[in-house]
Amino acid sequence: MICVAAHAQTQCPSYVETDAGSAFDVASIIRDTGSPQSALDKVRSAVARVNAGGGCSIFRDRLACEETLSLANKAIAALQACAASKLPKGTARG
């Protein structure tokens, strides 16, 4: 008898979308940065820069900024799951 173990692995989504219909091309940023973890670091850094600069209140179109940050946060959540599934066994990332 042959026994095969199947492990669930989170695949990186091609894109994420907000309820308003804005889309973020996750696959492209992973391709551009080289890995899900590098993409995650890049998106987190961009959000941190906006927040450090005063958040959306400094922009003329605050609602567009909030939609963009909402989309970025969805991308971060997807990339976190994807990057975690790509880590070698026994590796912790925090």
Image (spheres, grey):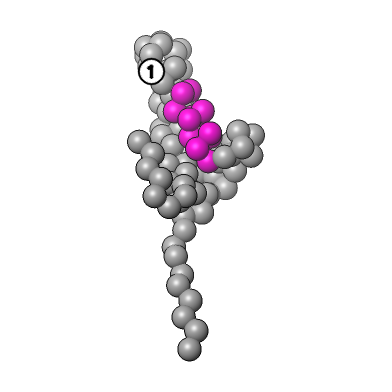
Residue visible at 39% across and 50% down in the picture: 90
Quadrant in the rendering for residue 65: top left
Q: Position of residue 33 (x, y in %)?
A: 60, 33
Residue visible at 44% across and 28% down in the picture: 44
Image check: 50 left or right of 32? Answer: left
Q: Position of residue 55 (x, y in %)?
A: 38, 16
Question: Is residue 33 within the magenta segment?
Answer: no
Residue visible at 53% across and 41% down in the picture: 36
Vertical placement of 48 versus 89: above or below?
Answer: above
Question: Is residue 42 within the magenta segment?
Answer: yes
Vertical placement of 86 versus 55: above or below?
Answer: below
Question: In terms of secondary structure, what is the magenta stretch mainly?
Answer: helix
Quadrant in the rendering for residue 66: top left
Residue range in magenta is 36-46
Q: Position of residue 43 (x, y in %)?
A: 49, 29
The amino acid type of the residue labelled 1 equals Asn
The residue carrying mark 1 is: 51
**Count of labels in the image:** 1
Can residue 85 be seen here? yes
Q: 27 and 66: which one is in front? A: 27
Q: Position of residue 23 (x, y in %)?
A: 53, 39
Q: Quadrant of the C terminus?
A: top left
> Circle 1 sits in a helix, a strand or a loop, which is it?
helix
